Image (spheres, rainbow, N blue to C red):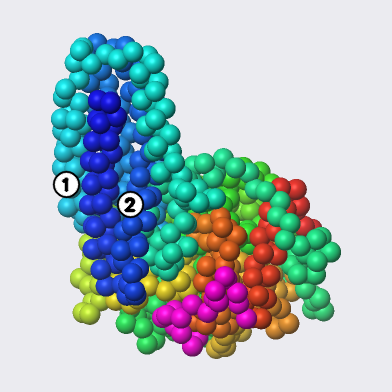
Amino acid sequence: MRKIKRLLAVFAYLLLLYLLLRLMFFTLYFHRADFAGNALPLAFYWGLRIDISALFYANLLFAICYFLLFNWLPALQRKRCAVWLLSLINIPLLALNMIDLVYYRFNQRRSTIDLFSVLPDSLHAIPGFVKTWWWVFGLFLLLSVLTVAAFNYIFRAENAAHHESLVANLAAAFCFLLLMAVIARGFTDRPIIPSTPLLYLPVQFQPLATNSTFTLLYSMVKRQTSLKEKKYYNQQQLEKMFTAKRQFPQQEVFRPMNVVLLVLESFAKQYVSKNDTLRASTPFLDSIMAQSVVCNNAFANGQESNKGLVAILASLPPFFDEPFYNSPYGNNRLRGIGSILKEQGYATSFFMGAGYDHFGFARLAKLVGIDKYYSMEDYGNSKHFDGNWGIFDHYFLPYAATQMDKMPKPFFSTVFTISTHFPYTLPDTLRQRFTLPGQGIEQNSMSYLDYALRLFFEGIKDKAWFKNTLFVFTADHNIFWYQRQRFTLYKSFQVPIFFYMPGEAQQQSIDVPVQQLDLVPSILDLLHYPKPFMSFGQSVFDTSAQHLVINHFGSYYQLIDSSFLLGYNESTERPEWYYNYKEDPLLNHNLLQPGGGMDSTGRQLMEALKARLQYFNSAMIKNTLYIK
């Protein structure tokens, strides 16, 4: 019984610690939220249930060791081993939850195993994070010290007289672990998982009701599971509903225009929307958009750079927790935009002012058929390093322009900017110029990037190849970090997408839903590409196509058409939300009927979503995405 009491004391302390973390999370992100009815107490109730589950799974190894192994150790070593093992398990998990107090504002979800694919490329930015959120680091150190002290206090009474028989230890271990396992699993026919609170709470409160420990552990288990064939429809039905095989009935001859794809880091649509409160001063981009085909209802497919770039360059939806190129299917054969255009005689290149293979982008470039990769090492002047991510954009973009001028024509180049990323560092020589009245540091960095883009275009506008070039602008993802607007499921994915052809400059608006997956087919459509290719998107210029947007975050898939927004939970295989975002922009009225019923439009969207999920899984498992 002594051992059970000590373990219960450990759990009680850790539950109080996690309650403190949840209160901090609530204060930072949810204190202004509209908790209708009993939503707030339900969020904290399910938070407690999930905390118990997370702590049980995380500390299961310790419990086994404590009951069955530590009893054979001398008293002092028994106490030391208990304290050290508990600390080694729980302090890193405390760090993870503290990280999400900050990181949540950038990706709007609790961290999963995907954090470890981002972390190595973010280590050099830690000084900037420490400077801005010093109190988080200070609090982490304080809580770590208190945690070790609490463990020492709980196990202070360990001594030689407390040896118990093997039978007594086994009985105590069995009773304790069985009780905790039942509580951790829950009492329903399905175990508690991170999405369980959605059965009782609106989707926007799910991050409050869970914790980062649980989402990480769940994603680690889930990641080890290969995709499974879905059987929503038979093959004949599926072929009628969706295919990723694309081919344009082109009558015109292929036109070998140069293509420059500009991916603007964290550049949310709100920064260039005329009537938005977050509108930034971007005079150069405004002048370009005035001569471009502008997609007014455009969305990113994911919420991280490595997901967005896969959608942009490979036209693959980000349906994995990890980047596609790090998944078990990363060796599947496919033709990305680089491969397709190389077959037409294009030189291909990728420019990014960060280090080589930052976020795995060099691997992705090779995967989609891009040959040349230019990084800060190629730039070669460390004096222009921003101290966090790489070379300041106003230096690196003109360098990219110079390299493009040397390339054989036609060429395809992707330029990924980096300066509009936390900590939004401005060059010392330009800080005063771009510290603009009424703008925050994020908007100032957007204004600075606007200046860097102007320098890029000034370096190429008089080149012979300039007017035979298609420029495509988009962002890797939105960064819905601000709290001045209520969080909505669709606004957190909105990004700018527009097409600029200086040789045919004209302003045109496209109002149908557009996504990053549509960029490859749209580029190939403009080039009059006549052959078959693979894409999960459609050309934005194809008026006969069904234009839908698909998003993925955590266990949720979301489908957006011109008016409606449908959310689907893959874990429970149930729809979770259904809104008319045109008439209800704040998403106050979930149109799901009791039991998950929907009107005919909702049912059609559900069928379209399931068809895409089934097609994706089948194509990945069978490696059938190489279409030529």
Per the rendering, the mark at residue 48 is 2
Q: Which residues are magenta?
A: 582-599
From the viewer's perspective, is the residue at label 2 or at label 1 nearer? Answer: 2
Left or right: residue 331 versus residue 289 is right
Q: Is residue 252 above or below residue 221?
A: below
Q: Can residue 345 be seen from the camera position used here? A: no
Q: Is residue 2 above or below residue 415?
A: above
Helix, strand or loop at mark 1: helix
User: What amino acid type should be assigned to the residue bearing mark 2?
Assistant: Leu
Please name the residue shown 38% across and 72% down the image: 487
Neighbour class for label 1 at 10 Å: few (<14), some, many (≥20)?
few
Q: CA distance from mark 2 to mark 1?
A: 25 Å
Mark sitting earlier along the chain (2/1): 2
* Residue 554 % position (x, y): 49, 56
Q: Can residue 153 be seen from the camera position used here? A: yes
Dominant SS of magenta comes to loop
Please name the residue shown 75% across and 48% down the image: 622
Circle 2/circle 1 CB separation < 8 Å: no
User: What amino acid type should be assigned to the residue bearing mark 1?
Assistant: Gly
* Residue 293 % position (x, y): 57, 83
Left or right: residue 185 versus residue 599 is left
* Residue 614 % position (x, y): 70, 59
Location of residue 53 (image quadrant): top left
* Residue 190 % position (x, y): 53, 50
Instruction: Let me know if residue 585 is in the magenta part.
Output: yes
Quadrant in which the C terminus is drawn: bottom right
Neighbour class for label 2 at 10 Å: few (<14), some, many (≥20)?
many
Please name the residue shown 34% across and 54% down the image: 47
Q: Is residue 217 above or below residue 299?
A: above
Please name the residue shown 21% across and 45% down the image: 140
Residue position marked by numbered label 1 in the rendering: 138
Instruction: Let me know if residue 383 is in the magenta part.
Output: no
